[in-house]
Amino acid sequence: MSSAVSLWLGPLAAFASSCTWAYGTSVYSALARQHAPVTVNLCRALVALPLFLIGGMVAAGGWTDGLAEFAKLGPQHLGWSLVSMSASYGLGDMSFFMATRGLGVSGALAVASAYPLWTVLGGVLFLGQTPASLQWFGLFLTLVGVAAVILAGARGKNRPKKSEAEGIAALTSRLENRWVGLGLALVASACWGLNSFAVSRVGQGVSPFVGNAVRMACAIGINLSMAWFLFPKAPKVLPRADLKKHAPVFVIEPFLGSLFFMYGLANSALVVGTTLASLSPVIAVPVAYLTGSEKPSLIRTAGVLLVVLGLYLLM
């Protein structure tokens, strides 16, 4: 493999993870209106874990070599995996869900989508990865463009409905205040930024199959604990009919998406990989135009162009 191709594989994988999340997020948001979010996340992890275990063995060429790959795991991989899933499938997703009560889905997304900034700052402080001046400007333009795309699509209609999941109403009944929503969205943003940084560490020295298998095992434990403590009477897994109906999403997003996400962040500069991995709201815009599900919008189109210019400066 040429060095030029190898150089681009990481950023391309990070971008591909945005595409898979854009595919999965509409299904997850619809399911989260009927079930506890930890139930949705638990099913994502339960489906993905055996796929990563099998994929790791196949990629290694057999059981013996596959077990040797898992033997490469060290305490740092386990620690960062626990940090990653606590910050994403755990506290981050829960904070975002609660933030939508005060800000709406689009408003919460606009705030939480600033998470690449926190990841980049982590790279500057702990890894010595200091972006050039043009890259900082590119990151700023990208974040502004993403926020413009999200907010231009709000128009009040994306305000979340009351979830029917047992226990959620009681948990979120006092979260209608916009300032509370802003604080929770910032918590989600910080958690997602921490997750990106942690994933880039998990992917060092091990195959993405092995690293993600550990992450999903951690996610199962975290979400089971949250389900028992926060939603003790709610079902722990989704109904079979929902799983069967959305089976492609539960395979493509948590399995392929996580595979792309880890490889992309482990093989890119943080400022590039994290930004490319956060573009799902922008990717959804041209797709909606092409399919006719949305009419073209000047503001959203301008936001997409800002993102493109920002990415050009980043790369």
Image: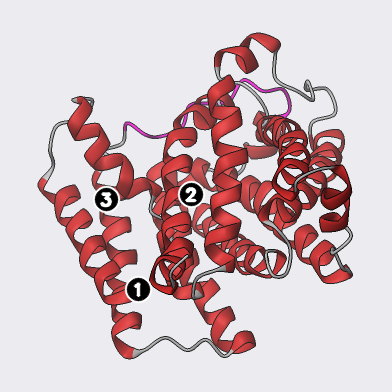
Q: Which amino acid does label 3 sit on?
A: Val
Which is closer to the viewer, label 3 or label 2? Answer: 2
- x and y percent of residue 313 in the render? 26, 76
Q: Which colour scheme is used?
A: secondary structure
249 inside magenta stretch: no
For residue 85, above or below residue 241: below
Mark 3, residue position: 149
Mark 1 vs mark 2: in front: 2
Residue 256 spot, x, y in % from top left: 56, 41
Tell me the magenta residue range. 157-167
Q: Closest to the observer: 125 or 154?
A: 125
Residue bearing the label numbered 2: 17
Residue appearing at x 41%, y 54% in the figure: 15
Q: Which amino acid does label 2 sit on?
A: Ser
Calculate the distance from the C-alpha at mark 1 to the C-alpha at mark 2: 18 Å
Q: Where residue 244 sits in the image (x, y, percent)?
A: 62, 13
- Which of pointers 3 and 2 lies earlier in the amino acid sequence? 2
Hey, which quadrant is residue 12 in on the image?
A: bottom left
Left or right: 208, with 256 as reference point: right
Residue type at mark 1: give it.
Answer: Leu
Q: Quadrant of the C terminus?
A: bottom left
CA separation in Å, label 3 and label 1: 15 Å
Decide: marks 3, 2 in contact (CB < 8 A)? Answer: no
**Circle 2 — which element?**
helix
